[in-house]
Image (tube, rainbow, N blue to C red):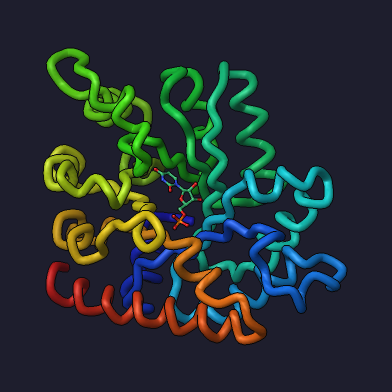
Amino acid sequence: MTKQEIIKQIFSKKSYLCVGLDTDINKIPSHLKSAEDPIFEFNKQIIDATYEYAVAYKPNIAFYEAHGPKGWESLQKTIEYIPDDIFTIADAKRGDIGNTSKMYARAFFEQMNFDSITVAPYMGSDSVEPFLEFENKWVILLALTSNQGSKDFQYLKVNDQSLFEEVLQKSQDWGDSENMMYVVGATRTDQLEKIRKSIPNHFLLVPGVGAQGGNLSDVSEKGLNKDCGLLVNSSRGIIYASDEKNFAQVAAQKAKSIQEEMEGYLAKWC
Ligand SMILES: O=c1ccn([C@@H]2O[C@H](COP(=O)(O)O)[C@@H](O)[C@H]2O)c(=O)[nH]1
């Protein structure tokens, strides 16, 4: 999917919501557990209910890998079910020596046809570049993550700046705002203005609103640019809003209320 296609979706739906499909068999409503593929059945109903309000879906690959071959099958069915006009993110956090990264890229871009994949920058340019060789596919590079442990390394000083700033700067040599986005946690808004200044045109994937306590208003005020430039993810806050039979309806209400808030911010800041 191209940047222009992403922007078109955002302004037509008036939403920059990404729904995270972190589907945990232990958290899905009990009436679905007798289905042939409960994980896919849950995802299907969540997608049907939230499609109107979302521009992206982000299955976190760990939740599927944990079930072995059956989990990969649920993931494949899920990705095939997501409508073509929706941006898809494989939250896989991959990255290895070049010839291995190439295989990861083939798995997620060719076999599963994801639009994008999250990649860890730690192994450097040759671990990221193989993902950038695919046309209309995106690398979403981890920059400043939402978890507590981000403080262990990401703020360490390197060349007079924080390591995450070094990642932002150095990676400008690898790709551009047409094929690279960055992960910046919603719990890190104290850095967001500065990040937006240093990469004015890139999209940011922002996880951490909802269950992790990040604030959508703050993220939007500091992170929006003229093209929107944000995909804000919520997983548990939407998909597990209810564990009753009406879970999909409740998920839709949650997604709708986030979309309505986003509509206001788009009108104000873009
Ligand atoms: O910095 C990061 C990078 C990735 N994630 C992932 O996003 C979702 C967040 O889920 P919630 O339930 O909305 O908290 C999850 O898949 C994480 O692995 C992140 O949270 N922070």
Q: Is residue 50 above or below residue 198?
A: below
Seen in the image, is 9 located left or right of residue 239? left
Seen in the image, is 26 located left or right of residue 260? right
Q: Residue at x 24, y 45 (%)?
A: 188
Q: Quadrant of residue 215?
A: bottom left
Point out residue 66 in the picture as x, y percentages from the top left corner: 72, 44
Q: Residue at x 64, y 22 (%)?
A: 100
Q: Is residue 184 above or below residue 248?
A: above
Q: Nearer the viewer, residue 268 or 211?
A: 211
Point out residue 121 in the picture as x, y percentages from the top left corner: 42, 26
Point out residue 255 in the picture as x, y percentages from the top left corner: 43, 76
Q: Quadrant of residue 177?
A: top left
Q: Is residue 71 above or below residue 152?
A: below
Q: Quadrant of residue 259?
A: bottom left
Seen in the image, is 246 located left or right of residue 145? right
Q: Nearer the viewer, residue 124 or 99?
A: 124
Q: Nearer the viewer, residue 105 or 167?
A: 167
The outermost residue toward the top is 159
Q: Can residue 99 be seen at all in this image of the molecule?
A: yes
Q: Nearer the viewer, residue 212 or 254?
A: 212
Q: Residue at x 51, y 47 (%)?
A: 116
Is the C terminus in the top left, top right, bottom left or bottom right quadrant? bottom left
Q: Residue at x 50, y 74 (%)?
A: 241
Q: Can residue 172 be seen at all in this image of the molecule?
A: no
